[in-house]
Image (spheres, rainbow, N blue to C red):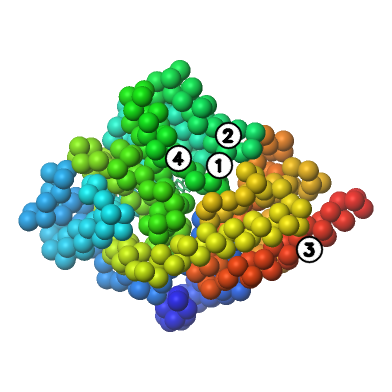
Amino acid sequence: MYDKYNIENYELIMKTSPTVGELIKKEFERQSNNVELIASENYCSDAVMAACGSCLVWKYAEGYPAPPVERYSGNKGRYYGGTEFVDQIEEYCCNVWRKVFNTDYHVNVQPHSGSQANFAAYKSVLEPGDTILSFDLDHGGHLTHGSAVNFSGKLYNLVFYDVDDNGFIDMDNVRELALQHHPKLILAGASAYSRILDFEKFGEIAKEVGAYFMVDMAHIAGLIAGGVHPSPFGIADIITTTTHKTLRGPRGGLIFAKKELAKKVDSAVFPYAQGGPLEHVIAAKAVCAEEALRPEFKDYAKKVVENCAALADEFLKLGYKIVTGGTDNHLILLDLSDEPFSGKQLQERCDANGITLNKNCVPNEKRSPMQASGVRIGTAAMTTRGYEAEDFRKVVRRIDAIIKELREEFKEA
Ligand SMILES: *Cc1c(COP(=O)(O)O)cnc(C)c1O
C-alpha cells in the first residue's frame, strides 16, 4: 500500500543528494524486509505520503481558519494571507475527525506530535505546580505523563497510580490516591499496557474528586476508531492522540476537548506552544481520517486485536509469561524476569535476525530501565502488511528459537 510512492520519491532525492537518497532507500528496504513488531509503529498509505509531500509543505498559516468557518473557541483568523485553501483543508480535517470518533467535541489538528498535544492539553487546564494523577512510565505510561526528565515532571506535581499483582491498573489505588491528593487532572492512557482502559471508572473518580479527566489515546486511537476498544468520548474532558500509531496516518498529534475548553486548548497550541501549523501534515491527517472512516478500517482494527490474541496464545502455549496473562489490544508485554538475559539482549538478538521490537520494563522491575526485563510486541504494523494469525504464530516460534539460543549461551557463560 505504500511501495510506489516511496520508490519514486527516493529516486528523485537521489538526483540532488545521493547520500540522503541512498540512506532513505536503505531504510525503505529495512522497513520492507524486517518483521516490524514495534507497537507504536505502522505504515501509511500512498495517499497519506503524497499529502505529506505536497505543496502545502511551504505554506504559512499561523492562527486558525477565519470566518465563515466557525470554531467553538471563537479564535479566528490567520496571521498570513493566501490561506483560503489551507483554511478549508484544516476545517475539513477537524470535521472528518469528529466523524471518525462520532463526536461533537472541539478538535485542534495542529499539534506537531503527541508530546506537543499533551504539552498544550496540560497548559489549557493546569497551572505550574498543579497535581496530576497519572500512570508511571515504568509501568507503561508515557514520558509526557510526568517523567522526571520531561517537562511534565518538571512543571507539575506528579502522583502515580500502580498496577496490581497481575499487572492490571489498580482502580482502587487510583481512587485512593485521588481522594488523598486531590489532583487537578487525572490522566488515563499508556504506551505499554495491554488491557482495556476503564474510562467509565476513571471518569467517575475524576468527578468524585472534582478533577479534570484527560485521556491520552495515542496507542489505541485506531482501535477506538475501529470500534474494538471502548471510547472515551462523552466521558473525558480532554483527549489527546497521535495519528501515526494504530491510526496509521502521518506523524502528528490531535487534541479533542469539551466545547467549554475550546478557547483554552486553541490558545495553548497557538500561540503558546507552537508557531505555524504543518498544513501538509494536516492534509495528511485528513486523508488518514477518511481512511479510518472506511469499513476496511474496522476490519483492520478487528484483525489487529485478533492477531495479537493469537500471538499471545502462541507464547503462552510455549510456556512464556506475559504481563496480565494476555491482551485485549494490539500489544503484549513478554515477561523475561526469570530469564538469564535482559529485554535489551533479546531486542538486540531479534534485530540481528530481522525482527524489530523493543525492550520494556515490567511491573516490579528488577533490572535497570536500560536493560529491562520485558519486551513489547505489537501487531499493528504487520497486520497492515497483510499478516494473518498464523503468520504471527510463526514469528512467535522464531522468537522462541532465538530465546532458546540465548538461554544456551548464558548457560555456557
Ligand atoms: C507515542 C505516545 C505519545 C507521544 O507521541 P510523540 O508523537 O512521539 O510525541 C504520547 N502519549 C502516549 C501514550 C504515547 O504512546
Q: Residue at horizontal 26%, vertical 51%?
A: 103
What quarter of the picture does the N terminus occupy?
bottom left
Figure check: 270 above or below 129: below
Q: Earlier in the sequence, mark 3 or mark 2?
A: 2
Residue under label 2, please give it.
Answer: 163
Residue under label 4, please give it.
Answer: 198
Q: Nearer the viewer, mark 1 or mark 4?
A: 4
For badge 2, the amino acid type reads Val
Q: Residue at horizontal 55%, vertical 42%?
A: 140
Residue 401: which disc? 3
Q: Earlier in the sequence, mark 4 or mark 3?
A: 4
Q: CA distance from mark 1 to mark 2?
A: 10 Å
Q: Secondary structure at mark 2?
A: loop
For badge 4, the amino acid type reads Asp
Are the residues tagged 4 and 2 within 8 Å (C-beta)?
A: no
Q: Residue at horizontal 18%, vertical 51%?
A: 64
Query: In the visual, does 33 lie left or right of 191?
Result: right
Q: CA distance from mark 1 to mark 3?
A: 27 Å
Residue 250 picture location, percent across and down: 39, 62
Q: Residues within 10 Å of mark 4 (few under 14, many from 20)?
A: some
User: As rendered, which of 347 and 323 lies closer to the eye?
Assistant: 323
Q: Secondary structure at mark 3?
A: helix
Residue under label 1, please give it.
Answer: 140
Q: CA distance from mark 3 to mark 2?
A: 31 Å
Q: Earlier in the sequence, mark 4 or mark 2?
A: 2
Q: Secondary structure at mark 1?
A: loop
Q: Earlier in the sequence, mark 1 or mark 3?
A: 1
Are the residues tagged 1 and 3 within 8 Å (C-beta)?
A: no
Q: Nearer the viewer, mark 1 or mark 2?
A: 2
Quarter of the view holding residue 185: top left
Q: CA distance from mark 4 to mark 2?
A: 13 Å
